[in-house]
Image (cartoon, rainbow, N blue to C red):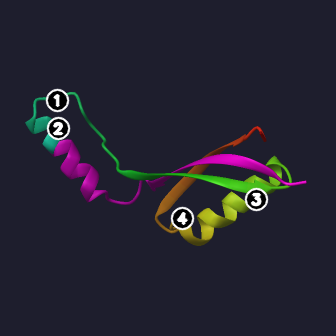
Amino acid sequence: MANNYHARIYVTLRSSVLDPAGTAVESGLKQMGYDGVAGVRIGKYIEMTVEAQDEEDAKTQLDQMCDRLLANPVIENYCFEVTQLVNS
């Protein structure tokens, strides 16, 4: 019997990749008076429900989805959190 899992996926640029959007946001925040802001990086946050046999199967599916579509492994890193949904 398959279970449903809730996934939270975080995709960020690798530290070696320039982030012009992050630089622009940092500059804007400083212009607004937030002088203590530094190192702003912009990323993506994705939520989804995945049907899988168990948590390891859900993680395997998510890893494949990230590698194939959700992240660009050449310039981005990703991580995810998985929690089983209670079937009602």
- Label 3 packing within 10 angstroms: few (<14), some (14-19), many (20+): few
Q: Quadrant of the N terminus?
A: bottom right
Q: State which tag comes first along the sequence, 4 or 3.
A: 3
- Label 1 packing within 10 angstroms: few (<14), some (14-19), many (20+): few
What percent of the width, then of the height, locates residue 17? 38, 60
Q: State which tag comes first along the sequence, 1 or 2.
A: 2
Residue that carries the numbered disc 2 in the rendered image? 29
Q: Quadrant of the C terminus?
A: top right
Of residues 87 and 9, the one drawn nearer to the viewer in this rendering: 87
64 horizontally vs 86: left or right: left
The kind of secondary structure element at disc 4 is: helix
- Label 4 packing within 10 angstroms: few (<14), some (14-19), many (20+): some
The kind of secondary structure element at disc 2 is: helix
**What amino acid is at disc 3?**
Thr
Residue that carries the numbered disc 3 in the rendered image? 60
Which residue appears at 31% of the width and 57% of the height? 19
Residue that carries the numbered disc 1 in the rendered image? 34
Q: How much space separates mark 4 and mark 1, taking CA atoms? A: 32 Å
The kind of secondary structure element at disc 1 is: loop
Q: How much space separates mark 2 and mark 4, taking CA atoms? A: 29 Å
Q: State which tag comes first along the sequence, 2 or 4.
A: 2
Labelled pair 1, 2 in contact (Cβ < 8 Å): yes
State the mark number for residue 70.
4
Q: How much space separates mark 2 and mark 3, taking CA atoms? A: 39 Å
